Image (spheres, rainbow, N blue to C red):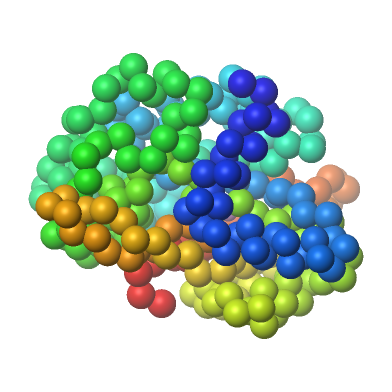
Amino acid sequence: MNPETFFTHLWEDYIRMAPRAAKIKQLFEEQGETVLNDHVAFRTFGLDPIGLKTLEKPILALGYERFAPYRFEAKKLNAMGYLHPKPEYPRIFLSELEVEALSPKAQSIIQALVGQIDATVVENDDILWAGPLWSPVAYTDYEQLLEESEYAAWVAALGLHANHFTIAVNHLEKTPSLEAVLDFVESAGYAINESGGRVKGSPDVLLEQGSTLADRMEVNFADGIKRSIPTCYYEFARRYKGPDGALYNGFVAASADKIFESTNTKQ
Ligand code: OOG
Ligand code: NI
């Protein structure tokens, strides 16, 4: 698969999960803006056969290279940033949950899901938007996971998807500041993630970020139970040049920690 095809399929899957992202993109385009992606992000369980080291294979096959690792102690997550040699392709952020750090109860729920995966499916080139690779999780198990890790519950209910796309604010002309972008999106009726403040980061750390709260979708749980749960969100990022004169390409762990909360069930 080439990167164009990859990102086209990924976007189509993403806007099925978060139709509001397509509407927000359109609002910017109606202002005459060109919407470019700063990065996309994925989530997974850190267990074979869907751990980071396996899921990064299709990313590396697109020509991406590992750029920098990140660690989120409180959320029990590890992540990696990837860059493509061609700067027109967005950065990629792939995180995985350190399942062994959860309670035995949560671990056994997750192992029962991951144990259903046919290891050959992870070789498919559309694995990163394959959705759940297991039969629907019980709603009580979803609730149990929520208590320990909103991230775990999200992956259990939804499986593999782009968790968000991110508009590159540097390329916007009418709303060049992150505050202006968030005000514009909010005034169109979309709630903003306020965790840690609306704008996360600052020019000092060379990255400012903000996001919508996740869209919601009715999801099928086991035993025919359907519930509306948070799905995917839209992020906005503005990058600054470092002392070397080059645009910063990394992520900022303290900010990312709050961006993760865009999919929290309560905010
Ligand atoms: C990823 C959150 C972190 C960023 O840009 O710092 C992030 C997630 O919610 O899975 O996207
Ligand atoms: Ni992000």
Q: Position of residue 60 (x, y in %)?
A: 58, 23
Inspect this view and state whether residue 175 appears: yes
- Quadrant occupied by the C terminus: bottom left
Inspect this view and state whether residue 74 appears: no
Q: Residue furthest front?
A: 224
Q: Is residue 263 above or below residue 66?
A: below
Q: Position of residue 106 (x, y in %)?
A: 16, 50
Q: Is residue 50 above or below residue 237?
A: above
Q: Position of residue 242 (x, y in %)?
A: 80, 52
- Quadrant occupied by the N terminus: top right
Q: Is residue 46 left or right of residue 84?
A: left
- Front in this rendered view, residue 78 or 259: 259
- Front in this rendered view, residue 79 or 13: 13
Residue name at image x 20 percent, y 30 percent: 116
Q: Is residue 89 above or below residue 221?
A: above
Q: Residue furthest bottom?
A: 187
Residue name at image x 49 percent, y 28 percent: 126
Q: Is residue 109 left or right of residue 241?
A: left
Residue name at image x 81 percent, y 65 percent: 30
Q: Position of residue 250 (x, y in %)?
A: 66, 47
Q: Which quadrant of the figure shows ligand 2?
A: bottom right
Q: Is residue 12 above or below residue 3?
A: below
Q: How many marks?
A: 0
Q: Is residue 91 left or right of residue 262?
A: right
Residue name at image x 78 percent, y 30 percent: 86
